[in-house]
Image (cartoon, helix red, strand yellow):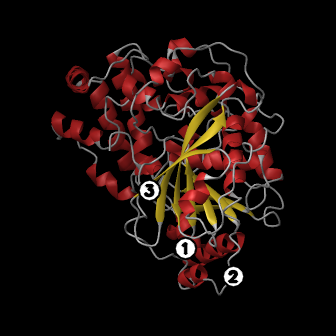
Amino acid sequence: MPRLRSALGAVLTTAVATAGLTLSPAVSAPPSGPAAPTAQAPATADIRDQVAALPGVTSVTEATAPAGYRFFKITFRQPVDHRHPRAGTFEQRLSLLHKDTARPMVMYTSGYNLSANPSRSEPTQIVDGNQLSMEYRFFEPSIPAKPDWPKQLTIWQAASDQHRIIKSFQRLYRENWLTTGGSKGGMTATYHRRFFPADVDGTIPYVAPNDVDNDRDAYNRFLANVGTDPACRAALTAVQRRILGPDRAWFLERTRQDAEATGDTWNVLGSLDRGMETAVVDLYFTFWQYSPQSACADVPGPDATKEQVWDWTQGVVPLTGYLDQGLLGTLAYYYQAAYQLGWYEAYEAPLADVLHFPGGWGGANFVPAELKPIRFDRRAMPDIDRWVRTRSTNMLYVYGGNDPWGAEQFTCGKRAERRECSVHVVAGGTHGARIAQLPEAERLKVTAQILDWAGLGSSDKASKAVAGDGRPVRNAKLDRTPDYLRPLGR
């Protein structure tokens, strides 16, 4: 999963506050419904006032938006534990890109923090609709004051957050609803539909890993053959071996200097050397995650200077990326990976003789000692996988052919066409795979499916806009690179 930097804030403080509590089941009874109704704003009221009157909404602040839209930053009150609504609440951040209540709504989940800037996901572009975005629980500042990690940070609790938000906003936005997200956000969108399948009309997850069997990794087999050029794979391995082998002392000192300049520490992994080595091991995976085949030309060769190699790593995985500030900024992801989501096996075989800390990748290794031990829930992902393969409806997955996260994909199983579940792979694509990159015939079919789920007929302006080649009209001010496509340190 992309490891996005965010402000450390109070994450470390709350992380060490609790640990060792009873684990909750993967599936449970539905949570209570949305918060008690508040006074409904009249339909003639300004849209800001109508949003403010929705159940659960505690604040609405308007920010600048491009012409034709309004953009609101919202806080929404959630139970800290949907099984025990009286146990307390916390404020969850949302944003709303409003176009028209007569247009479809797309709910976007990053699975991480919430962007402060307005943007449109690809499905929002296709349907020319509104977009409601949600910050994932336990990412600052959407975190309880006294978090109970194993009880409150589960895929079911997060799905229940999304369910409550949807039910509240559907009072105002009554046209068809879609959900989407990329990477962990694509996983989040899938998990929500598993627990609340009737909430929306369709879901489009992008590059969503499916670690259904965490003990049977497909990632290393994928990485051994990824791309079309064996020389590129060899060059990447040569850079890793150089950093961890003959030039290790120089790169370790350079990493120390950079860490001290930025205030990074290395308490979680225990040593600066281990932190640097972890980043170097990840270079190979992350290169293929984000880089097109053409970027092979930029991989430093044997004649590159140490500084040139250092500069190149900064654009792939900074060698300080697995120090405390990189790990704790996305602690909620690493905790969930160790608890329910699973993680990939590090591609260490080509580096075996130069590693000082083999086998230390992923899972609870990236979580502070105060939150351990974490007992992995082996029921959670098989339950999700089984639902997608056998019962899911109106699900459309997009993957990149060269993206290592696609080594373990969701599949739609039998009678997929009848259930309108499909998987689409962009040949040579990265973690940034988009519907717009699919071959034209496939792209047109996929776009038509999304428009149908959105309830838009052939006469609708959105349908007309994509009728030619299946690509929506882009808005340069809104259609930016999603947060999950921004590698660590960029």
How much space separates mark 3 and mark 2, taking CA atoms?
41 Å
The quarter holding residue 239 reads top left
- Comparing labels 3 and 2, the label whose residue is closer to the camera: 2
Q: Which residue is mark 1?
A: 439
Question: Viewed as shown, does residue 139 lie left or right of 451?
Answer: left
Residue at left offset 47%, top offset 54%:
430
Relative vertical location of residue 477 with respect to residue 402 in this rendering, above or below: below
Q: Amino acid at mark 3?
A: Thr
How much space separates mark 3 and mark 1, taking CA atoms?
19 Å
Q: Which residue is mark 2?
A: 457
Q: Position of residue 480 (x, y in %)?
A: 41, 60
**Residue 31: mark:** none
Considering the numbered disc 1 on the image, is that residue within a helix, a strand or a loop?
loop
Q: Foreground residue, 19 or 220?
A: 19
Q: Foreground residue, 349 or 14?
A: 14
Question: Viewed as shown, does residue 349 lie left or right of 79?
Answer: left
Q: Which residue is mark 3?
A: 228
Q: Amino acid at mark 2?
A: Gly
The answer to whether one can see residue 359 in this image is: no
Considering the numbered disc 3 on the image, is that residue within a helix, a strand or a loop?
loop
Q: Foreground residue, 145 or 255?
A: 145
How much space separates mark 1 and mark 2, taking CA atoms?
23 Å
- Comparing labels 3 and 1, the label whose residue is closer to the camera: 1
Question: Viewed as shown, does residue 265 lie left or right of 32?
Answer: left
The quarter holding residue 67 reads bottom left
